[in-house]
Image: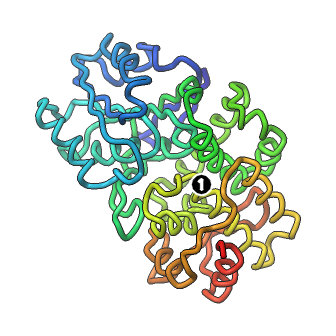
Amino acid sequence: MKTLNVSLGERSYPIFIGPGLINQAELFKPFISNKCVFVVTNTTVGPLYSKKLMQTLSTHAKSVYEIVLPDGESYKDWQTLQKIFDALLTQGADRKSVLVALGGGVIGDMVGFAAASFMRGIQFIQVPTTLLAQVDSSVGGKTGINHPLGKNMIGAFHQPVAVIADLDTLKTLPPKELSAGLAEVIKHGAIADATFFGWIETHQNELLACDPNAMSHAVERSCEIKSAVVAADEKESGIRAILNFGHTFGHAIESGLGYGQWLHGEAVGCGMVMATDLSYRLGYLNAEDLKRIKKLVTAMRLPSCAPMIGNQRFLELMRIDKKSEGGAIRYITLEKIGKAKIEAVDDSVIKEVLTANQAN
C-alpha cells in the first residue's frame, strides 16, 4: 500500500492506494470509530462492493446505513442530492455522522456536496471505484452537482478526511469507463510531467489491459501531481486551474449533448485534443507534439473529434464556465508537453479550433 498526503494545514488528509483496501477495517478506524456511518453508492457499484465495505465499517462504527442512488451523470442533480438528505434526516444523522462515497466521480461529487451542506458541514471519506475518480475527482475537495445550463456550477470546496483507493475495484470497470479514466491520467502528464506522459505512451497496452502494476503507478503519479497542485492553490484562485486542461471544451460537449451522452472522461479526451490544437495554433507546440497527444488519446479509445454542436453554441457553453472572468473565457494551453498555462484567447482563434475539430 502507498500512502500520500494532501498538505492543507488542518484540512490535510491521507490518500491510501493499493489492492484489498475495502477489507481493511483498521484503515477506516481513525475516521469512523463509534460514529454513525452512511455509505452512499449507486445501483451499479452497490451490488459489487457495498456489502463488503459495510461489513468492514461495522467493525468500528457505531452503526452503518446504506443509501443507494441511481447511476449516471444525468442524475447528478438537486433531486438525487435530496435523496441523501432525506435518508440522513430519516435515520437521525448528526454532526458527528460520517458519509462514505462508494463509487465514481458522480457519487464522490454529490456525497461531498451533501457532506459540505448537511448541518453546515460533516466529515466524509472518498472510496473511489473508477479510475477517473481514483486519479482525479476524489482528490482535492471539489464537490457539486450539475445545472441544466452548466456542469458542476453548484457546489462547494469540502475536503474529505481520507481517500481510500482500492485498486481491486478497477477490475470490474467496463472498458469504456477505464478509457474515460485514462483521459485524466494523460492530462496529468500533459500539464505537469513530460516523463510521465512518455511512460503512458510506452505502457498504453498494459493500461488498457488494467495491468495491476501499471494501474498502481498511474494512480500514484496522478495523485502526486494533483495533490501538489491542490496544496499550492486549494480554492482555484490561480495555478489549480491547469487541472482543467481539456475541460473547458469538454464540459461544453457534455452540456451541449446532454449529461450522460458522453462520459466525462470521453469529453475531456476530446477536449484535450482541441486544447492541444489551440496550443499549436498559438505557436507553443509543434506539429509533432500535436500528433503525439492526439495519437495517445485515440490509442486509449477516446474520441478525438467533437460532435457537431456549432461554433456559436460551443462559445456560449464555454462562457458558462467557472474559469470565465468578466465574460472572457480562460483556456488552459500547453507551453510544451509537461507545462501548462492559463490565458484568454481571441474568439477568432477559438473558432478556427472549433471548425477544425467538430464532426461534419
Figure check: 15 above or below 140: above
Position of the C terminus, as image quadrant, is bottom right
Please name the residue shown 54% across and 65% down the image. Answer: 238
Q: Residues within 10 Å of mark 1 (few under 14, many from 20)?
A: many
Image quarter of residue 282: bottom right
Residue toward you, 262 or 235: 262
Q: Is residue 271 left or right of residue 66?
A: right
Please name the residue shown 71% across and 77% down the image. Answer: 356
Q: Is residue 177 left or right of residue 272?
A: left
Q: How many marks?
A: 1
Coloring basis for residues: rainbow
Residue lying at the far bottom of the rendered structure: 348
Residue toward you, 167 or 60: 167
Residue toward you, 70 or 158: 70
Give percent across and percent down for residue 58.
Answer: 30, 14
Q: Is residue 135 left or right of residue 357?
A: left
Residue lying at the far front of the rendered structure: 360
Give percent across and percent down for residue 165.
Answer: 52, 29
Residue linked to disc 1: 266
Give percent across and percent down for residue 199.
Answer: 80, 41
Image quarter of residue 278: bottom right
Give percent across and percent down for residue 316.
Answer: 47, 80
Image quarter of residue 210: top right
Residue lying at the far top of the rendered structure: 59
Residue toward you, 220 or 291: 291
Figure check: 260 above or below 29: below
Residue type at mark 1: give it: Glu
